Image (spheres, rainbow, N blue to C red):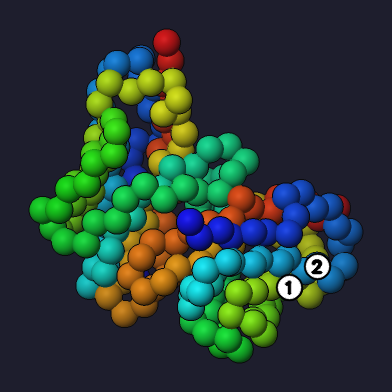
Amino acid sequence: DVKVTQSSRYLVKRTGEKVFLECVQDMDHENMFWYRQDPGLGLRLIYFSYDVKMKEKGDIPEGYSVSREKKERFSLILESASTNQTSMYLCASSFGRDGYTFGSGTRLTVV
Amino acid sequence: EDQVTQSPEALRLQEGESSSLNCSYTVSGLRGLFWYRQDPGKGPEFLFTLYSAGEEKEKERLKATLTKKESFLHITAPKPEDSATYLCAVSPGTASKLTFGTGTRLQVTL
């Protein structure tokens, strides 16, 4: 089974800090995604990547950036964390037309 | 713009009481429709992929069906361990990214 691992389950950061969320998948998936999930709003796509060093903006990219230097690793960066970025962050990977495999999520609190 | 609407928002069933969850969608050329289960505080877990109208998939007490405008997740004789949020998502014809609905929160009581 494909496994998607997110480096932290819970994270507390201060306003203005630079925050890195790491995601690693152990099967040779081309596609990787970052979503945030908020009550009543569902999952919203932040950024995605179809290949190494490639990235595309999703629906809500403002305040975020990403990095994909290796095929198995996709990092989400909050350049200057703000309280409205408090959320559950979910990483996923996929291959072709297959559905996503999700990580277990990182619950980020910005204080 | 791709859209997914799930109903009801919440559903409470007694053990053994069968029901259906609805997922209505609009998408520019359906590449796939996906159902996920999510437990509190965890990432979504893949259940089914449906690719074309008329297709059906089954897994234990769950059965997913697809028409050109909607999908149903039928739950037969549910048990308390089926309690979770069920998410529906669609993938448009040109890309792998998914658009999700806001989910149906299912609670099954004894």
Q: Which residue is mark 2?
A: A19
Which is more N-terminal, label 1 or label 2? Answer: 2
Q: Is residue B95 above or below residue B3?
A: below
Q: Which element is circle 1 on?
A: strand
The residue at 84%/52% (across/down) is A12
Question: The residue under label 2 is which amino acid type?
Answer: Val
Q: Which residue is mark 1?
A: A77
Kindly indicate whether the residue at mark 1 contacts the one at mark 2 (C-beta within 8 angstroms): yes
Tell me if I can see residue B82 in this picture.
yes
Q: Which element is circle 2 on?
A: strand
Task: State left or right for residue B28 relative to residue A91.
Answer: left
Q: Residue furthest left?
A: B54
The residue at 29%/16% (across/down) is B16
Task: State left or right for residue B90 relative to residue A108.
Answer: left
**Residue B12 percent location from the top left of the image:** 39, 22
**Which quadrant of the structure image shows residue B92?**
bottom left
Q: Is residue B89 above or below residue A16?
A: above
Q: How many marks?
A: 2
**Separation of marks 2 and 1 at Cα, in angstroms:** 6 Å
Task: State left or right for residue B58 relative to residue B53.
Answer: right
User: The residue marked by circle 1 belongs to what chain?
Assistant: A
The residue at 50%/60% (across/down) is A2
Question: The residue under label 1 is which amino acid type?
Answer: Ile
Label 2 Cα neighbours within 10 Å, binned few <14 / some 14-19 / many ≥20: some
